[in-house]
Amino acid sequence: MSDPLPAKERMKIPRQPMPERSPAERTRNFLEVNLGMESAAARREAQRCLQCKSQHCCGGCPVGVKVREFLERIERGDFLGAAAKMREDNVLPAITGRVCPQEDQCEGVCILGKRGEPVAIGWLERFIADYERQAGQVGLPPRAPHTGKKVAIVGSGPAGLSAAGDLVQLGHDVVVLEALHEIGGVLVYGIPEFRLPKSIVREEIDNLRRMGVQFRTNVVVGRTITIDELLDEEGFHAVFIATGAGLPTFLHIPGENLCGVYSANEFLTRVNLMKSYRFPDYDQPVYDCRGRQAAVIGGGNTALDAVRTAVRLGAQKAFLVYRRSESEMPARAEEIKHARQEGVEFMMLTAPVEFLGDERGRLTGARLQRTELGAPDASGRRRPVPVPGSEFDLPLGMAVIAVGNRGNPLVQSATPDLRTHRGGYIEADPETLRTSKRGVFAGGDIVTGGATVIQAMGAGRRAARSIDRFLRTGE
């Protein structure tokens, strides 16, 4: 191997592009948009890393991935070694490489980003995860000697899966309990196929099975079984609650109960998990928007997922309605770019005040109102203020409300000694993730409210460390 490039030469290398399907092709199907990097481009991109001693990128990752070390291996062409290094800290690299907001995390603190474009850490993460999978040589981390301790994890989303991966490596028996019929939580019911193929999620879950994690589906903790029964009758020594924030938030405006108005949770679950995009082959339809206009209310990643899904379902025109300006949108820049390419029309500084319907109770449109930005609110963003007299009607065949979620209340309602706070979220120590109930830990969106996949995984890792300490010491 030749000597490493000096920093000045590395800084001259342009960021390598991500190949993607054309907008004309991808709006007709649910195939993945980004196609992945070729090996030569991946090695070239890895050469852009300045190999900083400070390693801000590692600190910017919620699960602490050793970024510089896996990039060094990619640069050398040791792709399997890079994947193994990644899996020391991240048990779901093929997933996080696709859906992580790296621009706000590891790439957001990359030194190169101060003067140009940061290293494409997320794309390289995806590259090595796909490489090892396609080579059939997924390297799983070693497992510590068996401890005889059993841990139940409630919920199979990113927080639960991350905790399961770490706990099983530490030698504990781990059982993940999922309320739905398929493992993956928000990864399978909330994120569209064109952004995260279900086959990728299933293969990562199969890797966890190979590591020793057990999964049980159709188990609704809080209904079919309680936390106390898990601890007292089922013989579990600890429980980690990672049920997410799956209770949709609504606008509380007239017409929300009309046929054709969905929460984003229901809409995306029907399309993703129940395969309604393949109706009538799968008998689970959504309200037909083909040849009609559809609108999604909101400005986050879920709103972008929903409006791009509406495009693929055949909407004549798809609108994203957001009450602030585009600069305040929390959605990823890449998703906004893709939505624009796919023909989504952005209606900024606009908010619905009423949904309109016909005599049969079916949606026919929305009454919208222009807004302007006032003083900042609690989120730090400028508050949208209605503009009097600016109302107008927009004809619609379907509307999706994607303005956030609240904590799923099932577990809490059946566990009276589990303390909660405003919004129904579970109280947990931010460092140890211990709850008010001995042996019970909680993390992810059910504690913090809606966050990113990788932030939930970070919570899962913290919980695993605390649970391991509790099981070994009783503290």
Image (cartoon, rainbow, N blue to C red):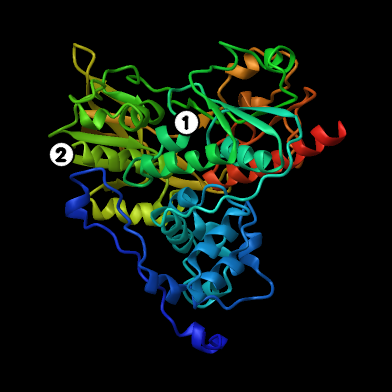
**N-terminal-most mark, 1 or 2:** 1
Residue 297 lies, in percent from the top left, at 36, 36
Question: Residues at badges 1 and 2 in contact (C-beta under 8 Å)?
Answer: no
Total numbered badges shown on the rendered structure:
2
Mark 2: few/some/many CA within 10 Å (<14, 14-19, 20+): some
Q: Nearer the viewer, residue 96 or 469?
A: 469
Q: Residue at the spot x=41%, y=35% of the render? A: 188
Element under label 2? Answer: loop
Q: What type is the residue that disc 1 sits on?
A: Ile
Q: What type is the residue that disc 2 sits on?
A: Gln
Q: Mark 1 — residue?
A: 183
Residue 22: quadrant of the picture? bottom left
Q: Nearer the viewer, residue 123 or 268?
A: 123
> Taking the image as drawn, is residue 68 in sight?
yes
Element under label 1? Answer: loop
Above or below, 72 against 360 in this view is below
Q: Mark 2 — residue?
A: 316
Residue 416 lies, in percent from the top left, at 71, 13
Alpha-carbon distance for marks 1 and 2? 34 Å
Residue 422 lies, in percent from the top left, at 65, 26
Judged left or right of residue 389, residue 23 is left
